[in-house]
Amino acid sequence: MSINVRGNPAANLDRQPTLSLSLSHSSRLYTTPHLPSTMTDQYLQEQHALTIARTVQRERQLAQARLDSDHGDSWVMITQTGDINPLPHEHIRHRSNAKVSLELSVPKALQQGRTPFARKSDNGTAYITTQRVIYIPAKPTAEFKSFHAPILNCADSYVGSPFFGAWFWSATVVPVSGGGVPADIPRVEVKMSFKEGGHSEFRQRFEELKERLEHVRRLQQETGQTVNIPDEPLPAYEATEGGGAAPSNLAPQQQQQQQQEEEAAGQPASSGGQNANRRPDEPPPDYDEAQAQTLSMRLEDHVREESDRA
């Protein structure tokens, strides 16, 4: 997490001559005193501590979401009214009716030698947000109460229809760390059956969001900057001669944001020189706990990657 802070006016006083104000009815001069360098050092330390604290707070929110979820197989947070509680910067883009069934299973090619895993719900509600695909059963059980998957973790999605039965949407999903899926299972199959229609709208909305997310990820890889998910339709993607994305393809809001970030990055941190790299002596509260949770999730990712290679 980065915090854009405008230049400290006090920092410029050390590089400019002392200002003086002359009053018309008095010959006395009033000078603006210099601010001590210790105030600049303290300001930088406070900003650095604030950055770390906000990062840890974000990690704690994600960890708390897993603890507060209805079941370990998913860390979707549910409100008292039964609706999902979106993550920060997440917005709901589609909601189906309550007549959607869900099946989770391990692909047949991966079943041998791995931990058995399967979940099923006859009726529930499917959501598509700007980040995830979510399913909430109408009648949660002790074994299964909710499911979610990042949109970019879904691949090979398609719709189909059996000879007798409802249209369904299916995809192969890479599980997230800490989501309840055994670490030795690299992929699972998800199948949602729409008993009262709505599969076309679900597929269309999913494809639109996935295209936007892939576009944003591509821009981030090429520019190295954080880009928000646009609400308007995406412009045509064109590569420049240097291999980067053409700046004209960005929405005006994205161009303005990138310009602000570049200007903020170009500002000097302070006139304190080496003081800008000074860090607090002690970590923020609950820093060790957040680090332990992060290491646990990384370990699960490593086990899943090794299992996928095998």
Image (cartoon, grey):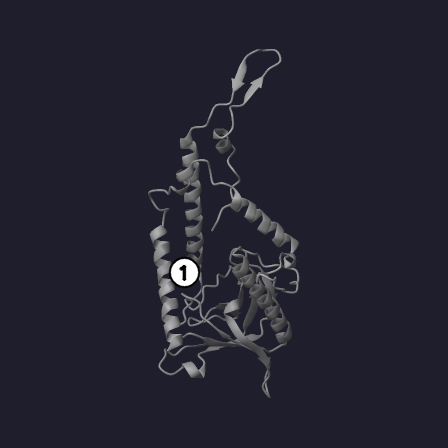
Residue 192 visible in the shown view: no
Using a 10 Å C-alpha cutoff, classify the residue at mark 1 as few (fewer than 14 neighbours), some (14 to 19) or many (20 or more). Answer: some
Question: Which residue is depicted at the point 35% across and 60% down?
Answer: 295
- Describe residue 159's horizontal placement relative to residue 2 as left or right: right
Question: Looking at the picture, how far across and down is residue 307, in whole percent?
Answer: 37, 75
Q: Position of residue 276 (x, y in %)?
A: 42, 40
Q: Quadrant of residue 233?
A: bottom right
Q: Residue furthest bottom?
A: 163
Q: Nearer the viewer, residue 181 or 222?
A: 222
Seen from this angle, which residue lies furthest top? 26
Q: Position of residue 130 (x, y in %)?
A: 57, 62
Residue identifier under label 1: 67
Residue at screen point 47% across, 29% down: 14
* Image point (43%, 36%), residue name: 272
Q: Is residue 249 visible?
A: yes
Q: Farthest front residue?
A: 241
Which amino acid lies under the numbered mark 1 shown in the image of this protein? Leu
Q: Quadrant of the C terminus?
A: bottom left
x%, y% of residue 146?
48, 68
Q: Residue at x 56, y 74 (%)?
A: 100
Look at the picture and state if 161 lies above or below 219. below
